[in-house]
Amino acid sequence: MNKQLNRRQRIQYFLMNLISFASIFLILGWIVFQLVQTSIYQTVDHDLQRLYEDKNFLQHQLTNNERKQEEITKTRKFATPPPNNFQQQVILWSKDGKIINEVELGSRFYDFQNLKLSTKDLKNIISIQTKDSNGRSLQFRSITLPVENQSQTAYIQLLVNIDPIKGTVEQFKKILIICMIIFGLLSIGLSYFLSKWFMKPILISWKKQQEFVENASHELRTPLTIIQAKLEKLFTQPNHTILEESETIALSLDEVQRLSQLTSDLLLLARSDSNSLTLEKQSVKINPFLEKVLLPYQELAIAEKKEFIIELGKEQQLVFDKERIHQLLIILLDNALKYTAPDEKIMVVSTVKNNEWVVNISDTGIGIADKKKAAVFERFYRGEVSRNRKTGGYGIGLAIAKWIVEEHHGKIELTDTLPKGTTVVLRFPVK
């Protein structure tokens, strides 16, 4: 993946994550603010609703205002207005929009001089704002009710001061905005980190794909080149018989067979990457199964003057994909035979213990260096010795072996055989 495409893809991931986080924070902040504001005003609105439904309270306010007006007229022309609780207020309005309960309001009457009567939202609780005699802003929750059968009072307005509540809401709003800004900055950093993190598997996959295509192309080109050369040679000598060119034909057929095997292995790896392969598990008696797989290799080892030892544990019946495990053992036994010399030893030990089926395939061959043990399971990896085409493969056998083991939820590891050689340890869980 080139740098420009990588950068473009990373920017897309960054913007996608940033927009997602920003949207979540904005929606969450708005919901929290609305819930807090609603819950705070709910108590005030409840008080207004209670006063509005209390007919005795409303009647008392109307009657008390008329009585106070009469007493003031009879006793004192100029009276000092009494103080009033400012948390809850009741205002009586005349038809022409004038306040008629100045005595009841007391000193607070001057704070409501700028308040205007509004009959648009009768019987609905609303928020209103006015200014007192000193020009300070006052906030109220209010409900206005029409009054019937009264000579002077046309409307009664109930008010609850919400300045402290409003201050609390504004303070909470500031804190919420600050928190959203802080978390917004954190989301930018997190989005950058996630975009980089998301790109890692893509880059690794792209790199593996490039390596896979390059290595596969190289491995496919070699046998094709040989076949092409041999066929062209046949055309240069059209009078030769099949017997005379048998060596050339045999070599071409050998390369065709190698090419067919390589193609099958590549197809298997490609299908394993796409998760389109499924295991066909069945109940299998392991000892007869192993004997059938190992016997041909034991005979081959004897023919090559190599010692081949088989140790099988107590008979068990396990569940696995018979064909894939067969393929796994062939890959490992081929390697064991390939890298051991005459008079050297190969040993296969099978045991079932601690809910595990353990298979050890040991040889006393050339061994594998510790720093290369992890790399041998990579696709198309081949050690220096195996690069000889007469003995070496294509470097994908152990990659297939690892896939088969992992599909059976098992583990494969390489250890040293003392004094020399390699031991492949297979561990499969017993279910």
Image (tube, helix red, strand yellow):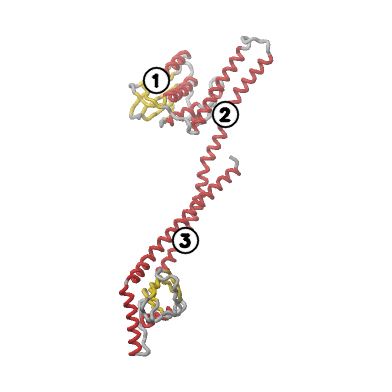
Q: Earlier in the sequence, mark 1 or mark 3?
A: 3
Quarter-wise, where is residue 117 in the image?
bottom left
| Residue 163 shows in the view | no
Residue type for callout 1: Phe
> What's under tag 2, amino acid-wise?
Ala
How packed mark 1 is, by other alpha carbons closer than 10 Å (few <14, some 14-19, many 20 or more), is few
Badge 2: residue crowd in 10 Å (few <14, some 14–19, many ≥20): some
**Mark-to-mark CA distance, 1 and 3:** 70 Å
Asked if residue 198 is positioned above or below residue 112 in the image, the reply reads above
Q: Position of residue 12 (x, y in %)?
A: 55, 47
User: Is there a contact, CB below 8 Å, between mark 2 and mark 1?
Assistant: no
The quadrant the C terminus occupies is top left
Quadrant in which the N terminus is drawn: top right
Q: Is residue 373 above or below residue 307?
A: below
Question: According to the image, label 2 marks what residue?
Answer: 216
Question: Residue 153 at x, y = what percent?
Answer: 38, 79
Question: Badge 3 local density, few (<14 within 10 Å), some, or many (20+)?
Answer: few
* Mark 1 element type: helix
User: What residue appears at the point 43 percent right and 25 percent down from the top-left corner?
Assistant: 325
> Residue 319 in the image: x percent, y percent?
37, 26
Q: Secondary structure at mark 3?
A: helix
Label 1 sits on residue: 289
First of labels 2, 1 by sequence position: 2
In space, the residues marked 2 and 1 are separated at their CA atoms by 33 Å
Q: Earlier in the sequence, mark 2 or mark 3?
A: 3
Residue farthest to the front, as pictured: 149
Q: Nearer the viewer, residue 277 or 47?
A: 47
List the residue tagged with mark 3.
178
